Image (cartoon, rainbow, N blue to C red):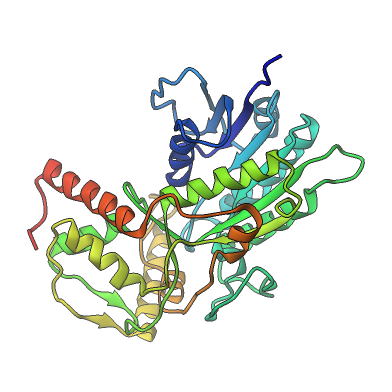
Amino acid sequence: MEKRGVNILLTGGAGFIGKAIIHELLEAGSPIQLEKLRVFDLSPDPGYTDSRMQWVRGDIRNATAIAEACCGIDLVFHAAAIVDWGTTPKEEVLAVNYTGTAHVIRACLEQQVKHLVYTSSLDAIFGGMPLVDIDERLPYPEKHPNMYCRSKCMAEKLVMESNTLPGLGLLTTCILRPADVYGPGDPFHIGALINMAKSGFYVRLGTGSSVSQHVYVGNIAWAHIQAADALIHENQATGGNVYFITDGPPSNFFKFFDAIVAGAGYRIWPRNIWIPRPVAYVMGAVAEFVALVLRPVKKYHPGFSRFAVLYTCSNFTFSSDKAKRDFGFTPKYSREDAYQMTVDFYRQEKVRNGAGQAG
């Protein structure tokens, strides 16, 4: 009798990382033999044509909906989250990132799902201070700078505690903490920087000396596939563990993305203007205040906040050595290929839009 493939549920499949996970799962070279991929997301079905896919429109804040989605599932990728830097109501962030994760875990246990891979964030361990050459043994900070960081920390703890809970059925879990994710269709960084370049006045925060890690969206998706494959094959090292995922050496946030913006054909001017951290922090506070004042009449999410200043102006470095050791993580896409695919996407988008100035 032929062994059937794996039935997978992906929450947040319409998101940046979620889309990349779908792509890697459906690729012919995926190590996971896929029987069915059920995607659970608030967004409507974008029209995938693969017969193995099923799109379920739902909200992870609805415990009944997520329990139904987990029926008949072997493994869950839980990537649904609100990514926020201090401008979304705290209650909303907590309800999605923490309570939603609690719903997913409860559903896994009730429906006897065997494995769970949780997409976390570096922000779970970020307390606002520099973190240099850290590893996964670093404890959580006593205080987080905002609810997003705190909610991801709280969710991580739930996932860790749920690993092989006795008396409730076996559920093996692991957690991935991606570095700063970039790539084609980046909803967080590149678009905002391109808009700034198009405005004709391009500024950066800090002094240019702080460095952090990055990871191509295809490589963090590939890490999910490799981690899931390890859980499916009962890799004892992976269950109950957390992993940093990056695919290159540290670099300054702005210098890293400047190369992509310029490579896509946008003129960066002035060439070298930096806003000192204290000044930028005050500007971030003002932007947050404006968002708060407008909230009753209009949802306004400024791309600038005090957290953005702290994050981009602080050293935050680590490696993926543990992931490589435990489940064989290696980047699928080289740094050069990732850069070129990202630049090509935004260059083509520039041509389509007929906007911007040539560099």
Residue 80: x, y in percent? 55, 43
The residue at the far front in this view is: 1
Residue at x-position 31% and y-position 48% = 184
The quadrant in which the C terminus is found is: bottom left
| Residue 79 seen | no
Residue at x-position 9% and y-position 45% = 354
How many numbered markers are drawn?
Answer: 0
Give residue 313's quadrant in the image: bottom left
The residue at the far top in this view is: 1
Residue 333: x, y in percent? 39, 51
The quadrant in which the N terminus is found is: top right
Give residue 100's quadrant in the image: top right
The residue nearer to you, when weighing 188 against 183, is: 183
The residue at the far right in this view is: 167
Give residue 312's quadrant in the image: bottom left
The residue nearer to you, when weighing 49 against 14, is: 49
Residue 293: x, y in percent? 41, 61
Residue at x-position 34% and y-position 82% = 206
The residue nearer to you, when weighing 171 against 310, is: 171
Side of 171 relative to 121 (left or right): right
In this picture, is 324 found above or below 218? below
Side of 61 relative to 17 (left or right): right
| Residue 98 seen | yes
In this picture, is 127 found above or below 243? below
Residue 71: x, y in percent? 70, 24
